[in-house]
Image (cartoon, rainbow, N blue to C red):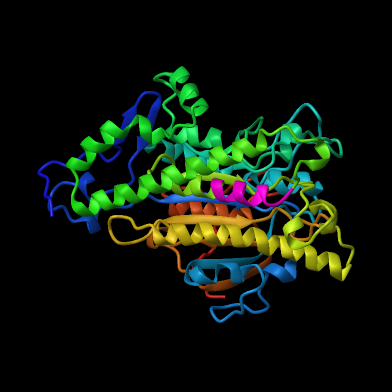
Amino acid sequence: MMIFKKAIPRRTFLRGLGASVALPMMDAMFPALANTNAVKMPLRVGYTYSPNGIIKDAFRPTSAGSNYEMSKVLKEWAHVRDKVLVLSNLNNGDAESVSGHVGGSTMFLTGAKPNESLSEIYAGISVDQVIARQFGKDTPLNSLQLCIENAAELAGQSAGGYSSAYTNTISWSSPTSPMPMMHRPRDVFERLFGDAGTDPQARKERIAEQKSILDFVMEDFARAKKKLSVADQAKLEEFTTVLRDVESRIQKAESTVNMELPDMQRPVGIPEYEEHSRLMYDLLHMAFQTDMTRVFTFMIAREYSELVFTNLGHTDPYHPTTHHRGNPDKIRRAGDINAYHAKLFGEFLAKMDATKDLDGTSLLDNSMLVYGAGMGNADIHSQWNVPVALVGGGRGTLKGGRHVLYKEGTPFSNLHVAMLNKMGIETESFGGELGMSDGELDLSKPA
């Protein structure tokens, strides 16, 4: 075992022409003989948004407490059950129907009703951006905002007198500034690992030649390895292998997307969607692993999404399927989509749980990940009793393995207040007139 008198910097990069690769956390980043258990691991926060609601019976358990039976959706997270906290009876607004899909997405993280206008948009700052302003002081990127669908390519963006800005994002830096969501894996990859400030032209040439970013940092990689212990070398090798794999998959995805296909042949759902989603989750995993950011928002589709999930045997678009009007077949198919989305999120949770921090805990142990939807019943656009789960250990502050029933009508924004306070961002209230919190959600409540 190699022992260093001096630790390498906590945020170390491998650098090359037009490339910059942040290293994951390693033992060598701490002074020799230091007690890593005394070092506070970073706390990460993420919000994954499911559009068009989630079918109630597919998500919500029939009983409360720790012995609840996992539903169709929750079964996809059974491997981390002890870190899953299911929260029921939270309202995303104090009126049963604020503004349908628009209210669901806008109020999810802002608690503020959207202004009904096609041009004068107004909502509120979202909780992720409140966190990002604090956590971003310690990371290269304040936050990441990702999505799957490219809203600019979709028709009928604005609906019901509301601007499309309300349904194309869930993140707001101010009441009038919706945060753009990145949908191209390459853009996310370059933001994490491309060094735009060095030589943009070199980066373009590397992409054009389909070379790996690792090819440009190999000299630095070799030098870094010589300074590391055997254990750290193995960790670095594992990380770079994953990095190369993700980059290769992005290149393959790009070659498929860029093919000239007639409109009738261009896929609208699977398998393109599935690999796209996995790439995004893998990029988020690496962003947390390298501490490039500690905050993300991710829309797994947008409100009004017309994706067709052909892999599930569907022929009808996603959005109309959720307006089931009590039709058992439509309810089943919408629930299948919900479970499918949960499966992909479950794969992300497994990777987070398998990645260890220096103190022996995992990335998931040191995270608070919210998964949910802005509508409790998409069929009638109800924003009451929205489906939501809080996953992770919160760096020792959360106890999962429970389904908690709160008082009916409890504001969803109470969860934001509770999470902000657990992060050390002292908060008494959050949200706008319709979604204002009335206190801090008790996350230690037994049932």
Q: Is residue 425 visible?
A: no
Residue 90 relative to residue 95: left or right: left
Q: Quadrant of the C terminus?
A: bottom right
Which region shows up in magenta?
269-279
Q: Is residue 317 above or below residue 444?
A: above
Where residue 297 sits, quadrant-wise, is top right
Q: Residue at x 52, y 36 (%)?
A: 188
Residue 228, horizontal then vertical, whole percent: 19, 45
Residue 123 is inside the magenta segment: no
Q: Is residue 318 visible?
A: yes
Query: Which of 26 and 215 lies nearest the eye of the viewer?
Result: 215
Prevailing secondary structure class for the magenta stretch in the rendered image = helix
Q: Residue at x 48, y 62 (%)?
A: 350
Residue 212 relative to residue 328: left or right: left
Residue 314, horizontal then vertical, whole percent: 80, 59
Query: Which of 76 and 141 lies nearest the eye of the viewer?
Result: 76
Residue 25 relative to residue 382: left or right: left
Residue 265, horizontal then vertical, whole percent: 79, 42
Q: Residue at x 72, y 58 (%)?
A: 311
Q: Is residue 353 above or below residue 187?
A: below
* Count of marks placed on residues: 0
Residue 353 relative to residue 297: left or right: left
Q: Quadrant of the N terminus?
A: bottom left
Query: Which of 365 and 127 lies nearest the eye of the viewer?
Result: 365
Q: Residue at x 33, y 46 (%)?
A: 24
